[in-house]
Amino acid sequence: MLSKKTKYGLKALVYLANREDRQPVQIAEIAEQEQISQKFLESILLTLRKNGFLGSRKGKGGGYYLIKDPADIPMTAVMRVLEGPIAMVPCVSLNFYEACDDCPDEDKCSVHRLMLRVRDSALDVYRSHSLADIL
Amino acid sequence: MLSKKTKYGLKALVYLANREDRQPVQIAEIAEQEQISQKFLESILLTLRKNGFLGSRKGKGGGYYLIKDPADIPMTAVMRVLEGPIAMVPCVSLNFYEACDDCPDEDKCSVHRLMLRVRDSALDVYRSHSLADIL
DNA sequence: GTTTACCCTATAGTTTTAATAGATTTTTAA
DNA sequence: TTAAAAATCTATTAAAACTATAGGGTAAAC
């Protein structure tokens, strides 16, 4: 299941992308419009900024704004930052790989092989979509 | 992320499917071979039985056994029983649908549309695999 | 000096992952 | 026939991790 963090983060990105002027938008505005707990959104926007998706400005007229063209923001990157691994098991994760304690041979593990396919199919979807594609 | 319940359940099903004689196998044997907490596995096997995948027999020579041909066990059914919804958001779930509190129009929701595609791609994978296919 | 993002901490709630203890049913053997 | 043994079944609950949110203070920009 998608965490609310991811859902909120996606909605915020879409909201900012639809602001074509790229002027800073206050957290409070996004929170209100998208029905999101302001404090929670605050931390989400912060991680989006730290990961290079957003810029911010403090003080009057400040807020968050998209730093890149939505067409240049692949959903794979967004999902990995917000939700974490796209894979459902660490042993099939490209960016967050971890071996299983038990499994002596991944190639012979039924779960591994099945989840590889699931990962690939999800990856196909995310790779073929940029932020611009979902506006 | 896949829960351990699902992972263990899948491994147990595969273990039983590989026993071609379909004779009862004790929980303790599966638990030991697959490195699973026996009591945890006990409850997992129970739900698999209650959902029509397994049969059981008590007493000496008892245990759990597959009740159907592995080729007749679609992974969609297994995943839904063990892991729950295949969709990442309730509003795109076929079997566990729920509307979002916020979202006034699903067709216009970016998250909804994206997650629909993710669900469909995952569904493709699960639908095209039976238990027999992952042995 | 006001407005806004930034940062840290805490906490209630939920889910996951078991551990514990015993009840029930079936088979086997005396 | 009866008792013991073997196994599943049931219920409770506890630890740990994670999720979502709130509070309050700090720092920077205007």
Image: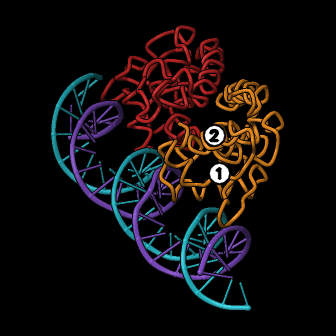
Chain colours: A red, B orange, C purple, D cyan
Q: For residue C21, what is the image quadrant? A: bottom left
The amino acid on which the numbered mark 2 sits, given as a three-letter code, is Tyr
Q: For residue B83, what is the image quadrant? A: top right
- Quadrant of the image containing the C terminus of chain A: top right
- Quadrant of the image containing the N terminus of chain A: top right
**Residue position marked by numbered label 2 in the rendering:** B15
Answer whether labels 2 and 1 touch (C-beta < 8 Å): yes
| Callout 2: chain | B
Q: For residue D24, what is the image quadrant? A: bottom left
- Answer left or right for C1 relative to A103: left
- Dot 2 or dot 1, earlier in sequence: 2
Q: Residue D5 at what x, y percent from top left?
A: 55, 71
Density class for disc 1 (Cα within 10 Å; few <14, some 14-19, many ≥20) is some
C3 or A97, which lies in front? A97
**C17 vs A12: above or below:** below
Helix, strand or loop at label 2? It is helix
Numbered tag placed on residue B25 in the rendering:
1
Identified at 59% across, 31% down, the residue is: A111
